[in-house]
RNA sequence: GCCCCUGUGGCGGAAUCGGUAGACGCGACAGACUCAAAAUCUGUUGCCCGCAAGGGCGUGCCUGUUCGAGUCAGGCCAGGGGCACCA
């Protein structure tokens, strides 16, 4: 028997699509565009199943939209700068560029095996000077616009590797590579002014209605808008020359009468000044700085303070003087780095007040509480429901009114004003790394930091660098950093930092519109293609990448490069690919390939026969070895099978489990489809043959029924693909294939309808199993590409039912079903239902009190 | 601690508006073909009682709304995720 040879066939069609340039696109104002983009991969070495899922989903969308007549842009590139390349350089002595480009070559080859409908002519790699030169130009222009600035900030410094680490790279206060104790260090760094767009980035989320609510929520929280007030306390006890005003931010100006202390962050300027003259203050500040920045360290640290001896005058109560502490729980990065504490209405302040014996005065009376007896025990009352008391002119007001009244009074006194505070902080992009985009700035002793003139861009990475000593190779390079100041011509040094790689991925989607343009972006091209209509990737980028890209697009808009503020009109976040885990008796993780599973679920080592513990289903990861190599799967079963399994069963937004049985199932189905066409071919009419003149006469009930199923499936399948319900589309195609395979075409009309059904099935299949689709299309006698076939339209008249099956309930319990002509009148349904013996039995001789009829669905008899 | 999401057969999941729960697939079982196996095909497959006809139960748990609840409301429980001295 003939069998489908996936390997040969897939290769054949990939070559033909390539030769015909099927997926190369250009701007065409006459046609509606659709831009599909999957998050571009980091060239880590080989593609993994997560990539396969991501790019399968994207490819289905791209092919479907293409069939729907859109001018589809579907590009691919490489997020090619980053730390792993430098690690490879250190471990294996291979140059980061070599390592990266070799990986790109490997992975490009693997992606091509998947048969993705990509316009490969637009391929870009962020590590290529042809990309990062433009990024440097954008940096310079943003610098000129004031969207980039330089400031001192404290960073995680690894003293062994001599580099700055991201928060994620600090584990238990130690560097993830070196294991060295991380220090807080002040460094001058470049920052993107993302906070200039805080409000816009927040409010525009409301308009992103094709984004998952979850991602929008996470971004809202991350931006963290809170309304409150700044107020200024007069400080007593300071030296003559010092500013005697302490600015604090609060969201609860209504509780000001309950204030019992002020607290400063350890690195607040005032705290630093005090520490300079007071050894015990200095010791406390140093201790706070040593405290790790990890979440655990913060959560478990005891609230501690150092009494500075200073006093803050209460703005509303001239006689009240609040002690000023330096406290370990106040953050310099948020608000003004100083707070007032109201212990009765903030748990943290309460803990602090109890520890240091400070007064606790309730000022918000919860509803139903008695003002004479209400007291705070171990728990603060942080609620905003209640009435203000013990608060002078605020007494009797609700919390909201009291906030307003307090702010008004502060403003009138010149002691404060209403203020909106964001959690979002500016984006520090300086990295002490080699394998990144050099920051195009020259530091001159006389002129300060100067942008590199545009004509001199790119500032190219030197190739002759060594990785044999810790620290930044760019800083160690003998000559690279030495240059002349662009302004005064004196000897000066280049900035040896490179940009955070998130910068690279903040505008690549725009570069894809005109990947070879001499400028960063060709305005006509971006105006045509942007925004990305459908962006697809992992939820792990919900905040950083997606927020940075949104910021960057706004910045590009401001400097005139693009006409849109939002880069991604639609976002889809796919789930992870998981697999069972296996461990041997010694606890060592085993690859699925090394494990043989028995029917009862137990497993043994394939070679040794030693027992293997089958563990939980977890995200595929190298460390747990629960990985399956996509290339091996494609080599065995073909890309279509891998794609089909990826789309079956689990909805795309959910995590899925990769199983050998599942792949086998997908493989069997592809063979089944092939057989369906192969077996039917001898009896099918010629392609494009007209409907037999006598068709209506030959339409037996079974043929009409088949036709109905076919057209229903076409309609439903399109809906499913529109809504990313690929698993349902897969199920419907299964159903249709089952029906077609079981159909006895015993006359000319039936054979014509069978061909129609098979052809439509193949066209529905095309976005998901494109190679098999093309092969079947060719076998059905067509010479053009299936890829060029439009998406089929269902004939609504043919898809409509003639009869409806209604459930009949008695008191809500199903007792029978009745089949009626579709849209039968209520009384017809009622009498048919009441005539059912099972219904009669259930009614037990009682009369129907009420009969509810829902057209084409149900009859409920109430007795 | 706060916020969000998810709980449906042995498993992945389906059920558009509150209207026949379990589509489709996997697995399992039985049968056909075969010397045998693989492949393929056919049938069965939520649980319980029953030879059967039939009946009862059933969408994490408890209440409620409704003629009718997987779906809506309130209260719990479990799992997953995000944020977290944010003033």
Image: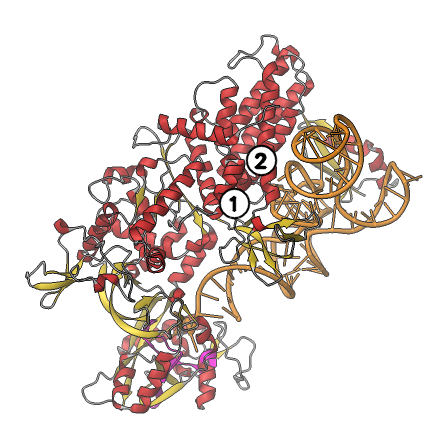
Instruction: Give the foreground label among 1 and 2.
Output: 2
- Check residue A667 in the rendering and tell me which mark sits there, or answer none: 2
**Which quadrant is the C terminus of chain A positioned in?**
top right
Quick one: quadrant of the N terminus of chain A? top right
* Left or right, residue B54 beside residue A55: right
Inspect the magenta stretch and tell me whether residue A221 lies in it: no
Residue A514 place in picture, x, y as percent: 27, 39
Determine the residue positioned at 30% across, 30% down: A28
Mark number, residue A652:
1
Q: Determine whether the residue tagged by mark 1 lies in a helix, strand or loop.
A: loop
Check the image and report above or below for B10 versus A315. Answer: above
Q: Position of residue A297 (x, y in %)?
A: 44, 75
Q: Which residue sits at x=53%, y=37%? A: A636
Is residue A184 among what the camera can see? yes
Mark 1 vs 2: CB contact within 8 A: no
Mark closer to the chain start, 1 or 2: 1
Indicate the secondary structure of the residue bearing disc 2: helix
- In the rendered structure, the answer to whether residue A291 lies left or right of residue A619 reads left
Q: Position of residue A732 (x, y in %)?
A: 59, 33
Q: Is residue A372 above or below residue B18?
A: below
Outermost residue, front direction? A608
Give the spatial CA distance, label 1 vs label 2.
20 Å
Residue A794 seen in the figure: no
Q: Can you tell which mark lies on residue A760?
A: none
Q: Quadrant of residue A829?
A: top right
Q: Quadrant of residue A860?
A: top right
Residue positioned 21% across, 55% down in the render: A462
The region drawn magenta spans A319-348
Q: What is the crowding at mark 2: few (fewer than 14 residues within 10 Å), some, or many (at least 20)?
A: many
Vertical arrangement, residue A814 with respect to residue A538, above or below: above
Q: Chain of mark 2?
A: A
Q: Is residue B9 left or right of residue A91?
A: right
């Amino acid at each position: 028997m003939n069998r489908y040879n996936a390997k040969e066939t897939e290769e054949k069609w990939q070559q033909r699509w390539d030769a015909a340039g099927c997926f190369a696109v250009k701007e065409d104002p006459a046609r509606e565009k659709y831009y599909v983009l999957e998050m571009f991969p980091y060239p880590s070495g080989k593609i993994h199943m997560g990539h396969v899922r991501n790019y399968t989903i994207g490819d289905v969308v791209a092919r479907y939209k293409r069939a729907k007549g859109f001018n589809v842009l579907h590009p691919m590139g490489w997020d090619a700068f980053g730390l792993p390349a430098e690690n490879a350089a250190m471990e294996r002595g291979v140059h980061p560029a070599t390592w990266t480009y070799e990986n790109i070559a490997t992975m490009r080859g693997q992606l091509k095996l998947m048969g993705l409908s990509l316009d490969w002519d637009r391929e870009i790699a962020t590590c290529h000077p042809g990309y990062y030169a433009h990024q440097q130009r954008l940096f310079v222009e943003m610098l000129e616009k004031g969207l980039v600035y330089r400031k001192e900030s404290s960073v995680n410094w690894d003293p062994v590797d001599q580099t700055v680490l991201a928060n994620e790279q600090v584990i238990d206060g130690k560097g993830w590579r070196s294991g060295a104790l991380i220090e807080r260090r002040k460094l001058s760094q470049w920052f993107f002014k993302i906070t200039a767009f805080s409000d816009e980035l927040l409010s525009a989320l409301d308009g992103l209605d094709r984004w998952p609510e979850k991602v929008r929520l996470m971004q809202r929280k991350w931006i963290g808008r809170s309304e409150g007030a700044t107020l200024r306390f007069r400080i007593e006890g300071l030296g003559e020359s010092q500013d005697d005003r302490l600015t604090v931010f609060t969201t609860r100006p209504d509780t000001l009468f309950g204030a019992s202390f002020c607290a400063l962050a350890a690195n607040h300027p005032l705290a630093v000044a005090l520490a300079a003259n007071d050894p015990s203050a200095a010791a406390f500040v140093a201790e706070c700085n040593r405290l790790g920045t990890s979440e655990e360290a913060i959560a478990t640290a005891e609230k501690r303070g150092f009494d500075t001896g200073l006093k803050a005058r209460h703005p509303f109560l001239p006689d009240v003087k609040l002690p000023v502490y330096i406290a370990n729980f106040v953050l310099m990065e948020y608000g003004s780095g100083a707070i007032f504490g109201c212990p009765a209405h903030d748990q943290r302040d309460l803990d602090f007040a109890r520890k240091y014996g400070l007064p606790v005065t309730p000022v918000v009376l919860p509803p139903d509480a008695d003002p004479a007896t209400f007291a705070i025990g171990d728990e603060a009352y942080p609620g905003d429901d209640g009435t203000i008391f013990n608060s002078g002119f605020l007494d009797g007001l609700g919390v909201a009114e009291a906030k307003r009244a307090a702010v008004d009074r502060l403003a009138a006194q010149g002691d404060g004003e209403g203020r909106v505070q964001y959690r979002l902080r500016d984006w520090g992009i300086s990295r002490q790394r080699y394998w990144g985009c050099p920051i195009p700035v020259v530091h001159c002793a006389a002129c300060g930091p100067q942008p590199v003139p545009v004509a001199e861009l790119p500032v190219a990475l030197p190739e002759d660098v060594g990785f044999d000593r810790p620290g930044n190779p760019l800083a160690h390079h003998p000559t690279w950093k030495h240059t002349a100041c662009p302004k005064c011509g004196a000897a000066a040094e280049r900035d040896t930092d490179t940009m955070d790689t998130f910068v690279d991925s903040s505008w690549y989607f725009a570069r894809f519109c005109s990947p070879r343009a001499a400028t960063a972006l060709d305005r006509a091209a971006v105006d045509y293609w942007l925004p990305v209509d459908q962006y697809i990737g992992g939820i792990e980028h919900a905040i950083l990448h997606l927020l940075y890209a949104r910021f960057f697009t706004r910045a590009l808009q401001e400097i005139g490069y693009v006409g849109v503020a939002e880069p991604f009109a639609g976002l889809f976040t796919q789930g992870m690919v998981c697999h069972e885990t296996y461990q041997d008796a010694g606890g060592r993780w085993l690859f699925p390939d090394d494990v043989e599973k028995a029917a009862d679920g137990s497993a043994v080592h394939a070679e040794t026969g030693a027992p293997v513990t089958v563990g939980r289903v977890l995200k595929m990861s190298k460390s747990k070895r629960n990985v399956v190599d996509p290339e091996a799967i494609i080599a065995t079963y073909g890309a279509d099978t891998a794609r089909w399994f990826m789309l079956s069963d689990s909805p795309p937004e959910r995590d899925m489990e990769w199983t050998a049985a599942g792949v086998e199932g997908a493989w069997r189905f592809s063979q089944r489809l092939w057989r369906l066409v192969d077996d039917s071919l001898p009896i099918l009419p010629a392609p494009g043959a007209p409907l037999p003149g006598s068709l209506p006469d030959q339409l037996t009930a079974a043929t009409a029924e088949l036709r109905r199923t076919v057209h229903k499936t076409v309609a439903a399948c399109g809906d499913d693909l529109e809504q990313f319900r690929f698993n349902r589309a897969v199920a419907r195609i299964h159903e249709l294939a089952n029906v077609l395979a079981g159909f006895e075409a015993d006359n000319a009309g039936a054979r014509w309808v069978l061909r129609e059904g098979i052809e439509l099935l193949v066209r529905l299949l095309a976005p998901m199993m494109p190679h098999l689709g093309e092969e079947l299309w060719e076998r059905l006698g067509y010479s053009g590409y299936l890829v060029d076939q439009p998406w089929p339209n269902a004939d609504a008249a043919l898809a409509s039912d003639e009869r409806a099956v209604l459930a009949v309930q008695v008191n809500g319990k199903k007792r029978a079903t009745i089949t009626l002509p579709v849209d039968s009148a209520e009384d017809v349904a009622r009498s048919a239902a009441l005539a059912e013996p099972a219904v009669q039995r259930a009614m037990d001789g009682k009369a129907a009190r009420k009969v509810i009829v829902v057209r084409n669905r149900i009859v409920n008899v109430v007795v």
